[in-house]
Amino acid sequence: MKRYIEKFLRYLEYEKNASSYTLISYASDLEAFERSVGDVPIEKIDLLTLRRFLADLKAKNFQKITVARKISSLRSFFKFLCREGYLKTNPTLTLRTPKREKRLPKILGIEEVTQLLERIPKDFLGLRDRAILETLYSSGLRVSELTQLDIPHVDFIGGVVKVSGKGKKERLSPIGEEALRAIRAYLEKRGESKKNRNTQALFVNKNGGRLSGRSVRRLLDRAIKRTSLVYHISPHTLRHSFATHLLDRGADLRAVQELLGHQHLSTTQIYTHVTAERLKRVYEKAHPRA
């Protein structure tokens, strides 16, 4: 099966322009499936084989959203094999996807965002961390988009950043003056170090290399520990907060869709549910006859 997986991943990379994160996700899902079925020939895989794989995932307490993603990966993989003539029938056609739990995204309040940003120290790493978190909240970028930013991608005069999103689709995203000010302060301090001068990457680690998504998560964890926030958040929480705060203040849903780089409006609509839930809580707390 390995050679078929490799063919599929090359197709995604060169013909579909899939991002590195998408390729990693598909590779992980398909390699897990390969380990599960063992030496079963690809043409012998049927619906029963797939159900056994899903039963194994359930036994390991995988979340429904994770199982749904793995099913999606398998569907794309077997569709590709049929289209290319490697298989005559697609065993995933009658495979059911588990119903996903509807969970509203976690967000921070405006005061909590301010607390998070204001308690970062002012040394070099602190300046970098603040610039990163300001950028995430100001532009609603995905972590993968943020770590791929180069210095020339930031237009300090126009107030926008050039972003390479999912499917390698580029967009211009507005960025606020607070974030630009934080980036300037970070770059000025960074310019004092010789090892950081020769890279185009906007955000670098202590060795001068491009920062990874995992490093961004770690620096956010450090920032959280300096605040009174008691719950765990991820960098994506700042993206959720960005979208929700815009809608709370009257932004148009389609404009938010463009800012987030969502292909479908239905993906953005989850934030309307978030704002509705917040309004409901305010109402129930404040109205005398609620």
Image: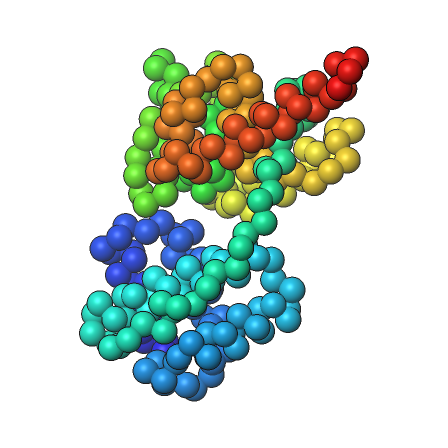
Q: Is residue 156 left or right of residue 127?
A: left
Q: Total marks drawn?
A: 0
In the image, what residue occupies the spot 56% across and 47% down? 214
Q: In the rendered image of this protein, does residue 73 appear above or below residue 20? A: below
Quarter-of-image position of residue 105: top right
Residue 75: horizontal and vertical position, in percent? Answer: 37, 64
In the image, what residue occupies the spot 36% across and 67% down? 93
In the image, what residue occupies the spot 66% across and 23% down? 280
Q: Is residue 37 visible from the viewing direction of this image? A: yes
Residue 262: horizontal and vertical position, in percent? Answer: 39, 36
Residue 6: horizontal and vertical position, in percent? Answer: 32, 69
Residue 209: horizontal and vertical position, in percent? Answer: 47, 44
In the image, what residue occupies the spot 48% across and 60% down? 97
Q: Which quarter shows the C terminus?
A: top right
Tell which of 151 and 269 is nearer to you. 269
Q: Is residue 151 left or right of residue 114?
A: left
Q: Is residue 134 visible from the viewing direction of this image? A: no
The coloring applied to the image is: rainbow
Tell which of 37 and 223 is nearer to you. 37
Q: Which quarter shows the N terminus?
A: bottom left
Q: In the rendered image of this protein, does residue 26 appear above or below residue 197? A: below
Q: Is residue 219 left or right of residue 76?
A: right
Q: In the rendered image of this protein, does residue 233 appear above or below residue 285? A: below
Tell which of 236 and 206 is nearer to you. 236
Q: Is residue 116 left or right of residue 178?
A: right
